[in-house]
Amino acid sequence: MEDEVKLFTREELKSRNKRNDAVLIIHNAVYDVTKFLEEHPGGEEVLLEKAGQDATEPFEDVSHSSDARSLMKKYKIGELVEADRTQNKAAYAPEWSNDQPNEQGKCVLA
Ligand code: HEM
């Protein structure tokens, strides 16, 4: 039982956008960043602005380091239910995805 991943809907996460209860959706996973707000090198404002919502795009826009990516595991509390997941995560971070639908291997022979 302990190993079961907790599943959330986007709807139920919407209201968790406060300083004392802040979650982020990044790559279909859910992170409770309440305790991380003050520690975030990018400041708490940007996190609160996206709290309760999908922050995949702004997260990737910043090109977070691998340090940041391993740090975030600590705050993961679950994932989105299947129906609420985005299918195009490869568009943001191909290295995170096993399925790469856009493999266009264009090769120009001179
Ligand atoms: C759990 C999620 C997150 C973690 C663990 C995290 C962690 C970090 C870390 C460790 C840094 C320092 C630079 C680096 O190592 O890349 C950083 C910088 C930054 N983060 Fe995040 N971050 C998270 C989410 C976000 C989100 C959602 C946003 C935007 C909405 C954001 C915006 C920024 C910005 C703007 C900086 C740059 C600060 C600067 O260079 O002055 N972060 N973050």
Image (spheres, helix red, strand yellow):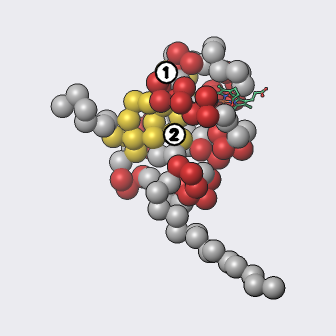
Name the element at disc 1. strand
Of 6 and 96, nearer the camera is 96
Which corner quadrant holds the N terminus?
top left
Viewed as shown, does residue 102 lie left or right of 60? Answer: left
Which residue ends up furthest to the left in the rendered image? 1
Q: Position of residue 16 (x, y in %)?
A: 49, 29
Judge depth for marks 1 and 2 and give the one in front: 2
Name the element at disc 2. strand
Residue 21 is tagged as: 1
Viewed as shown, does residue 29 lie left or right of 37? Answer: left
Does residue 35 appear in the picture of this structure?
A: yes
Could you classify mark 1 by the number of other residues whose Cα lies within 10 Å: few (under 14), some (14-19), or many (20 or more)?
A: some
Which residue ends up furthest to the front in the rendered image? 110
Identify the residue at image location x=52%, y=46%. 27
Identify the residue at image location x=49%, y=21%. 21
Q: CA distance from mark 1 to mark 2?
A: 14 Å
Identify the residue at image location x=70%, y=40%. 63
Instruction: Determine whether label 1 and label 2 are within 8 Å by CB.
Output: no
81 to 20, vertically: above or below? below
Of 52 and 41, nearer the camera is 41
Identify the residue at image location x=46%, y=24%. 74
- For the residue marked with disc 1, what is the amino acid? Asp
Could you classify mark 2 by the number of other residues whose Cα lies within 10 Å: few (under 14), some (14-19), or many (20 or more)?
A: many
Q: Which residue is mark 2?
A: 25
Does residue 23 appear in the picture of this structure?
A: no
Q: Position of residue 30 (x, y in %)?
A: 45, 36
